[in-house]
């Protein structure tokens, strides 16, 4: 069975959704850059090895990245899964795990890369918002897209109601994307394009409004 190491920084609800879903991928470890991350406890309670590598103890990003990859490599994972990991990873780290490093972002990329995505979506007045699972490349929040889920932005929404609607979909599409990866049903081609070699799996947009 394929395996992964999940990187978190806080609450860990995406990590928990992955652990709970029936993903054919073993979570070898959960690592955080912050020992206070609530998700570490969830991982421990689930019996998954976990550790914190405090980024504050490193004066240079590259040194932190090197320490983090040394810890990841102890587990020899097939995939490295960023789930609310709030540190920017440098080019050497990204290159080391190229094609095996994935992230979830709370917007429909390429709209709203970066932080405070729900606030910015509301301010922009978009009618559709959502989330994206993508391969990580050197440019933050710009890598090749594996799957997206769209949600409506409703007239009464505030940041927290919109975030909750998006989060529910994050918890669906991240396990889905990892299952595709585990089964070899999604690939990152040399051109940098994502392909679905088996047409059966090709449902890279999940639009709940159309399903209900
Ligand atoms: C999620 O919205 C994720 O998309 C973003 O940070 C949040 C992390 O939440 N990158 P959690 O720690 O998975 O609960």
Image (spheres, grey):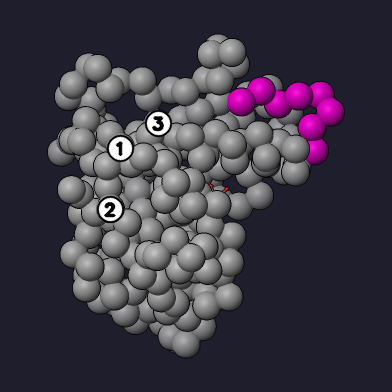
Magenta stretch in the rendered image: 151-158
Q: Give the residue number, with chain letter if any, for mark 2.
A: 26
Marks 1/3: CA–CA distance: 12 Å
Q: Which mark is residue 59?
A: none
User: Going from the N terminus, do you reach mark 1 or mark 3 first?
Assistant: 3
Q: Nearer the viewer, residue 86 or 207?
A: 207
Q: Which mark is residue 147?
A: 3
Marks 2/1: CA–CA distance: 11 Å
Counting from the top left corner in percent of width and height, residue 37 is at 56, 69
* Mark in the foreground, 2 or 1: 2
Dominant secondary structure of the residues highlighted in magenta in the image: loop
- Number of residues whose C-alpha sits closer than 10 Å to that of mark 3, classed few (under 14), some (14–19) or many (20 or more): many
Residue 157: within the magenta? yes
The residue under the point 59% across, 60% down is: 11
Would you say the residues marked 2 and 3 are in contact, meaning their CB atoms lie under 8 Å apart? no
Would you say the residues marked 2 and 1 are in contact, meaning their CB atoms lie under 8 Å apart? no
User: Going from the N terminus, do you reach mark 2 or mark 3 first?
Assistant: 2
């Amino acid at each position: 069975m394929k395996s992964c190491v999940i990187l978190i920084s806080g609450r860990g609800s995406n990590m928990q959704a992955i652990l709970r879903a029936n993903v054919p991928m073993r979570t070898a470890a959960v690592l955080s850059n912050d020992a206070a991350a609530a998700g570490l406890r969830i991982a421990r309670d689930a019996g998954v090895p976990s550790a914190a590598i405090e980024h504050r103890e490193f004066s240079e990003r590259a040194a932190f990245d090197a320490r983090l990859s040394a810890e990841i490599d102890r587990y020899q994972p097939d995939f490295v899964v960023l789930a609310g990991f709030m540190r920017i990873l440098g080019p050497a780290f990204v290159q080391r795990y190229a094609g095996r490093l994935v992230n979830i972002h709370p917007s429909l990329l390429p709209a709203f890369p970066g932080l405070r995505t729900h606030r910015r979506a509301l301010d922009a007045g978009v009618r559709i918002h959502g989330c994206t699972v993508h391969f990580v490349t050197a440019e933050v929040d710009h890598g090749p897209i594996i799957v997206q889920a769209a949600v409506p932005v409703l007239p009464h929404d505030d940041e927290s109601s919109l975030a909750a609607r998006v989060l529910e979909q994050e918890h669906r599409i991240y396990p889905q994307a990892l299952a595709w990866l585990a089964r070899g049903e999604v690939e990152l081609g040399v051109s940098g394009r994502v392909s679905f070699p088996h047409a059966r799996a090709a449902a890279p947009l999940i639009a709940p409004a159309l399903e209900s």
